[in-house]
Amino acid sequence: MQYKYLAAIDIGTNSFHMIIVKLLEDGAFRIIDREREVIRLGSLTGNNLSQINEDEILRAIKILNKFKKVAAFYGATIKAAATSAVREANNKKEFVERVFSETGIKIEIISGNDEARLIYLGISKALPVGNKKFLCIDIGGGSTEFILADKGNIIYAESVKVGAVRLSKKYFDNYILTEKSVKECSDFVEQQILSNKNIRLEETFDMAIGSSGTIESVAAMVSSIKKNTQVKSFNNFSYSKKDLYRTVENILEKKTSQERLTIKGLEAKRADIIPAGVIILKKIFELFRIEEIIISEFALREGIIFDFIYKNDLPAADFFS
């Protein structure tokens, strides 16, 4: 089968994303369209996002039908992957079947480790990492993925159940902050990371690379303060530990979502969950002794595209055009 256009859909806990790419004859591909819709999936029970309710299912179907129409305009083949909220849901089978019945989109529920591997595939193509040893961090709505790679080989790829939506639901009622809830959230993040014995905190690395919502949101806030303008692309943008800590302090001193709407560079739709996101990121900086992080705009969605290309023996895409 000949493929000219591919669509990758990331069915996340905080939002659904889609990219559409055009495959080029030289083996590269170009991103020609993007779609994003915010949707919060899963009711929290303990530390599990255990149930996708009927309203969420209906909204998911509506969004995915919209995505399907965009993909159909290009004649793109769709690959859809669901992450933590769906893989943890008691009714995940019903969710996947309802989506397929009403949209025709087949969803693959991927494991946390496979999610980390696909994120690595995307990140490793976005930046000139060469033969460096690097740590990849991707903070999502339901989980955070950690990948340590050296000279193109993955040392570990792990998923930890700490995410901006999950911890907002767990610790911040009505998204209101208290000193107690902030400390409990931070302590929980540390405990969850330390309990994963495959994550080797003693390992050193040449660079830390970050992707996805929280990490890019911090970049937008740092950039707005430093440059007094919005940057079109954050790929290869970096910020320091000092930049992060200053941003975290600014966020956590604003106790309500309404107060956080005044933060320069912060997307309004993220004002509710950004405290949990930056608490996770700050703790990661502490535990992994990170001084600076570099942004990759490519992650899971681009990884899905690369994975599809490799599995279907299509021309090897070594870069984005």
Image (spheres, grey):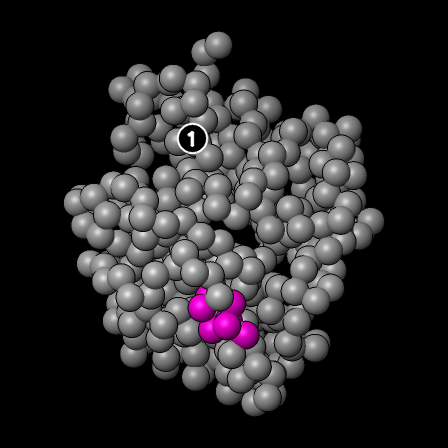
In depth, the one of 179 and 102 nearer the eye is 179
Q: What stretch is highlighted in magenta?
A: 188-194
Q: Which residue lies furthest to the bottom in this view?
A: 179
Tell me which secondary structure the magenta stretch mostly adopts: helix
- The image quadrant that residue 312 belongs to is top left
Q: Is residue 315 left or right of residue 52?
A: left
Residue 33 seen in this snapshot:
no
Across and down, in percent, residue 107 comes to: 63, 34
The residue singled out by tag 1 in the image is 307
Q: Position of residue 168 (x, y in %)?
A: 62, 70
Q: Is residue 288 or residue 244 the one in the foreground?
A: 288
Q: In this view, does 184 lie above or below 127?
A: below
Q: Nearer the viewer, residue 95 or 159?
A: 159
Q: Residue 305 colored magenta?
A: no
Residue 120 appears in which quarter of the rendering? top left
Structural crowding at the residue carrying mark 1, measured as other residues with C-alpha within 10 Å and reported as few (<14), some (14–19) or many (≥20): some
Judging from the image, what secondary structure is the residue with disc 1 in? helix
Residue 71 shows up from this direction: yes
Amino acid at pointer 1: Asp
Q: In this view, does 37 lie to the left or right of 159?
A: right
At x 65%, y 65%, the residue is 47
Q: Where is residue 171 in the image (x, y as percent from the top left)?
A: 64, 76
Q: In this view, does 3 lie above or below 133?
A: above
